[in-house]
Amino acid sequence: MARTGSVIDWLLASDPAIRWQVMRDLTDAPEAEWRAERARVETEGWGARLLSHQDADGQWAGGAFMPADYTEKKWRELGQAWTATCFSLQQLHDFGLDPSSARARRTVDLIGRNSRWDHDGQPYWDGEVEECINGRTVIAGAYFGVDVSPIVARLLGERQPDGGWNCERCNGSHRSSFHSTINVLEGLLEYETAVGATPETRAARAAGEEYLLKRGLFRRLSSGAPADERYLTFLHPNRWRYDVLRGLDYFRAASLATGSPPDPRLGEAIGHLRSRQSEDGTWPLDWQLKGPVWFEMEEAGKPSRWITLRALRVLRWWEGHAGR
């Protein structure tokens, strides 16, 4: 692993949304310093830019999951839009907008009062019906201080027999998916971080983790072949999509939250992550999801600060436990 000073400098010469995480996760800066940097997310760079697109009623693009004016014709031509409220909140969480800030508290309140899900008009913080969407709603709600325990209870009751989750459950699916499972696992972990774990959330996370670990984070259980070649490529933002780096980043966060060591079964995925590092010490952004966004942060095919940050902190965590 070539984590040179020049790569760290390159990461630090970036947006506050990346810089504060580099300070916390890679340079061990004092908490007061990285928190001060995180506070800049609201007023500078990508965070401020995204907040500038917020509607007066607290939403983005006039809708919870879809922009208010987004037609089926636009979807077919342009792809799914990533500008509505749920995806904007997901990015603000990724950026690290301070959840205790007045802007964050006002946003949470306005969305609770004004935003309704496209599915059946459910209040935003009550959740929807798809596990992927509800997992991400739990992430945002728990992070920004909303009581999302009813959504968590629903997710706990929707686990598949093989341990994970699948948004197609309502259509009769009895097998889990990598995509749905990682969204729910991240939500449950964020919930436990915010309000504490319960025996039920621990058991559900353990089952979902086992689903991924049995498959080496990317393989079919039946044949051992990659379940999807794109699981081995990296994108950001992931939105609802799974990839190996997203899986590893989750296991890192869970390990740090619980004090548990890395599972040895992550080794193959770690090896793949190392193999994708470029000679200059960075990782590329392999691809991006089709569809309108408020703004582009990086260009596919080029070195990615987001991917490099996430990869370096995963490897730092993994190597920190080597030989123990």
Image: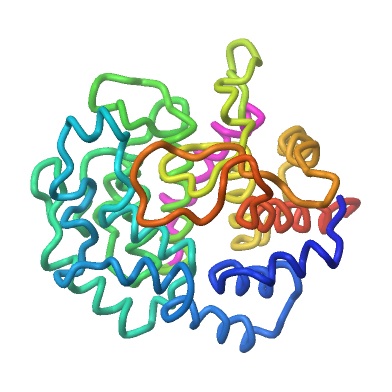
Q: Left or right: where does residue 137 sit relative to residue 31?
A: left
Above or below: residue 36 compared with residue 231: below
Q: Classify the position of the C terminus by image quarter.
A: bottom right
**Front in this rendered view, residue 58 or 249:** 58
Residue furthest to the right = 323
Q: Left or right: where does residue 28 sit relative to residue 297?
A: right
Above or below: residue 215 compared with residue 143: above
Percent across and percent down for residue 10 are: 73, 65
Percent across and percent down for residue 117 are: 16, 49
Taking the spot 29% from the left edge, 59% from the top edge, the residue there is 149
| Magenta span main SS | helix
Residue furthest to the left = 121
Taking the spot 39% from the left edge, 69% from the top edge, the residue there is 49
Q: Left or right: where does residue 42 sit relative to residue 304?
A: left
**Front in this rendered view, residue 148 or 93:** 93
Taking the spot 71% from the left edge, 53% from the top edge, the residue there is 314
Percent across and percent down for residue 300 are: 58, 42
Provide the residue span drawn in magenta.
Answer: 196-217
Residue furthest to the top = 223
Taking the spot 22% from the left edge, 40% from the top edge, the residue there is 129
**Quick check: is 272 in the magenta stretch?**
no
